[in-house]
Structure formats: structure tokens, C-alpha cells
Image (spheres, rainbow, N blue to C red):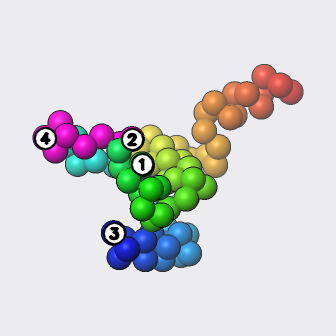
Amino acid sequence: MQQLKIVFDRCFEAGVDIAICTDNAGLHNVRLPFEYESLLTHDIINFEQLKACQDAAFRHAFAWPHRDRPATILTELLQA
């Protein structure tokens, strides 16, 4: 697991997006919350980095061109 931390650290330092996902969770019985928990409890990433990974996954999954998620944009529009 410690080697994984080095990879994550280098990617974050270089500004490379990381999307944490499971490969066929039904086959391997590993769900995304467990992946998050495992990375956090083994000090591979911190909560700020987890949030960055989640944001990157959203952007790449939906080809989202904006910096903020739709909920943030809508909230800002409604509060204006």
C-alpha cells in the first residue's frame, strides 16, 4: 500500500486527475465506499485529496467542462 501513496502523491503534485473506482464491483464484491475507507485508513490520501478525486471522477464521467459541480452552480444562481 505504501507504494500506492507514492503514486498518488506524484499524481497530485503533477496536477494529474485521479478517479477512484472499482472494476466490476459485482464480481469482486468491493464497493466504492470500501475503496475510500481503505485509502483513508492506510493514510494513502487525506479527505481533501479524496474530494479532489471525487470531483475529477465526476468531471471525467460526464465530460463536465466546468470547475464546479452542477449543484454548486445552481446554488450560487439561486442565492444571487
**Residue 2 placed where, x, y %?**
37, 74
Q: Earlier in the sequence, mark 1 or mark 4?
A: 4
Residue shown at 25% from the left, 43% from the top: 30
Q: Nearer the viewer, residue 76 or 31?
A: 31
Callout 1 crowding tier (Cα within 10 Å): few <14, some 14–19, many ≥20: few
**Residue 65 placed where, x, y %?**
56, 47
Front tag of 4 and 2: 2
Callout 4 crowding tier (Cα within 10 Å): few <14, some 14–19, many ≥20: few
Kindly report the distance in space between the C-alpha atoms of the residues bearing marks 1 and 4.
20 Å
Q: Earlier in the sequence, mark 4 or mark 2?
A: 4
Name which residue type carries label 1. Answer: Glu
Q: Earlier in the sequence, mark 2 or mark 3?
A: 3
Kindly report the distance in space between the C-alpha atoms of the residues bearing marks 1 and 2.
6 Å
**Residue 74 placed where, x, y %?**
69, 28
**Is 21 within the magenta?**
no
Q: Nearer the viewer, residue 64 or 54?
A: 54
**Res 63 visible:** no
Q: Are marks 1 and 2 in contact (CB under 8 Å)?
A: yes
Q: Nearer the viewer, residue 22 or 17?
A: 22
Name which residue type carries label 2. Answer: Pro
**Residue 37 placed where, x, y %?**
42, 48
Q: Assign a secondary structure to mark 2.
A: helix
Q: Which residues are magenta?
A: 26-33
Residue linked to disc 3: 1
